[in-house]
Structures are given as structure tokens and as C-alpha cells.
Amino acid sequence: MEGSSFVSTHTDEVPPEAPQYTGRMVVAVDGPSGSGKSSVCRAAATTLGAAYLDTGAMYRAATWYCLEQEVDLDDHKAVAVAVEELPLNISTNPDHQVITVGESDVTAAIRVALISEKVSQVATNPEARALLIAAQRAIIDREGFIVAEGRDITTVVAPDAQVRVLLTASAEARLRRRGAQLGGTQDDEALRRQVLDRDTKDSAASNFTVAADGVAVLDSSELSFQQTVDSLISRVQLAQGARS
Ligand SMILES: Nc1ncnc2c1ncn2[C@@H]1O[C@H](COP(=O)(O)OP(=O)(O)O)[C@@H](O)[C@H]1O
Ligand SMILES: Nc1ccn([C@H]2C[C@H](O)[C@@H](COP(=O)(O)OP(=O)(O)O)O2)c(=O)n1
């Protein structure tokens, strides 16, 4: 399974103006829905000149593909077979996130409410998880310096990462942020399903509510977006300093 080749990535260069850190470093960030993982990690990766991996996008793309192939998401074996053949390509450039499945650009399609409501069925499928985790490890190993985020990066995918952070925020802050991010298109009930109910389902597959040993908690509830980004960056710079 290690080095699984069904997922490839665009080999875009990191921004030329970014300061380059030449050592190997993995920055692992986990947290619940709406805590700010994707936006904070992308911004931090850009500033640091690191690659960026959105593992949630991989689960979302797998879900999109299963629905496209009319796979019954309750059929565990069929979902695993679909994920094994998933022709996924995910960008690791924080400034240019493009996700394709075969010839289809699914970058926007994987964010729609239907995918948010179904994705846990794929994320809680152990065989599908094992395949996607192997692909994530291969991408992380290939990049010298990467910020990877999801639900099990600090604990399962890259427990030996040099920087390990659990990014949290209150349920109220997460619902408010997701509502704003979706432009007020979702009613309260739909938002709760997409944020809180999904967290409950996803908790069956990984622990992202309590920090594991050696994982630092970064609570963004009372922080501005930039303060949250700066806090993550300073943890990375501290680790870089400790290594040089
Ligand atoms: N203090 C903050 N920290 C992180 N994100 C914040 C903050 N305040 C507002 N946000 C916003 O919350 C929204 C949800 O963040 P996102 O990165 O999609 O979360 P996740 O990937 O954890 O689901 C984004 O639009 C982000 O800009
Ligand atoms: N490492 C990961 C990343 C995501 N998942 C699952 C859990 C989530 O419901 C989906 C989608 O993740 P994503 O990070 O896009 O979710 P949000 O940005 O929080 O809405 O994938 C996972 O099980 N393990």
C-alpha cells in the first residue's frame, strides 16, 4: 500500500518570493470542521514557502467519485474498490489548489452541501481510509517541507511530524464561520448537519477533539484569522530554529 500510485499531484513551484527553508519539515494540523484548518494552513504555507496538503479534499474527491460512479456508499467493499481506482490529482501549491478526478476539475464540486453531508460515509470506511492514508504519506514523503491538515495527521498519517497542532474553536465560532464562508446560503439546520453532525460521525474514525501526547492545542475562538496564522507560523519558526 505504501507509495500507492493512484494519486498524483501537480508539481507546482512554491511562490518564488517566499523565504525558502531547505531542511525537511512536516507540519501536521488536525481539528474539527470550521476550526480554520484549510484557510490557516494555506496562508501559513504560503508565508513559509512550504507545500500544502488538504487531506479532507481527498476524502471529498473520493466521495464525489463514488457518487459519480453511482456506488452505494453503504456498500463498504464497493466504496473501497472505487477508492482504489480513484484517478485523483491534488495540487500541493497553497496558492493554486486544483483537484481533478480523471478529466474532471472537481475543485468546486467537492465543496457542495451534498458532498459535505455524505463524506463521512467514505471517511469511516476503513479500507478507503487505508488507501487514502497511504497516498497522503507518499505525498508528504515526497515534499521536503509541507503543511498537511485533516483529522488524523498528528496521530496516524504523520505522528513523527516536527510540528503537531490541534486547531480548535468553539462550536458557535465554527458554525458562524462556516455560515459566512458559504455566503449565508445554508439555514441553521443544514449548517449543523454539515459541521456538528459530521464531526460526530467523523469521530468514529479518528480523534480530533483531544490533543494526543506531544500535540499543541491552538484555540482560535477568540483570535482573528491573522493571529491564528501567525501563531502557527511562529511554532514552525521555533521548530526550524531548534533544528538549525
Ligand atoms: N480566527 C480564525 N481562525 C481561523 N479561521 C477563521 C478565523 N476567523 C474566521 N475564520 C474563517 O473560518 C472559515 C472556516 O475555515 P476553514 O479553513 O474552511 O476551516 P476547516 O478547514 O477547519 O473546516 C474560513 O472562511 C476562515 O477564513
Ligand atoms: N485526515 C482526514 C481529513 C478529512 N477527513 C474527513 C472528515 C471530513 O468530514 C471530511 C472532509 O474534510 P474537510 O477537512 O474538507 O472538512 P471541513 O473543511 O472541516 O469541512 O473528510 C478524515 O476523515 N480524515
Image (tube, rainbow, N blue to C red):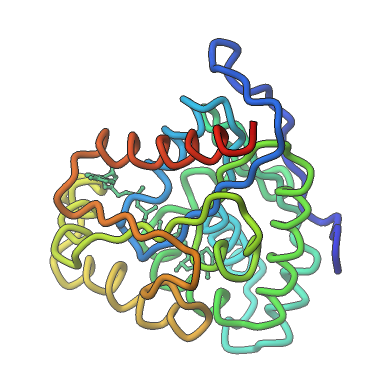
Q: Quadrant of the N terminus?
A: bottom right
The residue depicted at 73 percent of the width and 57 percent of the height is 137
Relative to 105, say whether 81 is above or below. below
Q: Position of residue 151 (x, y in %)?
A: 49, 66
Look at 36% across and 57% down and name the residue there.
Answer: 167
Give above or below for 243 relative to 110.
above
Q: Position of residue 153 (x, y in %)?
A: 57, 62
The one of 183 and 90 positioned closer to us in this rendering: 90
Location of residue 117 with respect to 97 vertically, above or below: below
Give 125 or 144, whichever is nearer the viewer: 144
User: On the picture, is 137 further left or further right than 178?
Assistant: right
**Of 227 and 138, which appears nearest the observer?**
227
Number of disc labels: 0
Q: Pinpoint residue 170: horizontal percent, then vertical percent.
A: 19, 64
Image quarter of the C terminus: top right
Quarter of the image where one finds residue 17: top right
Q: Is residue 20 left or right of residue 221?
A: right
Residue at 38 percent across and 75 percent down: it is 210
> Residue 217, image x and y in percent?
35, 60
Say left or right for 164 vs 125: left
Residue in the picture at 22% in, 72% down? 192
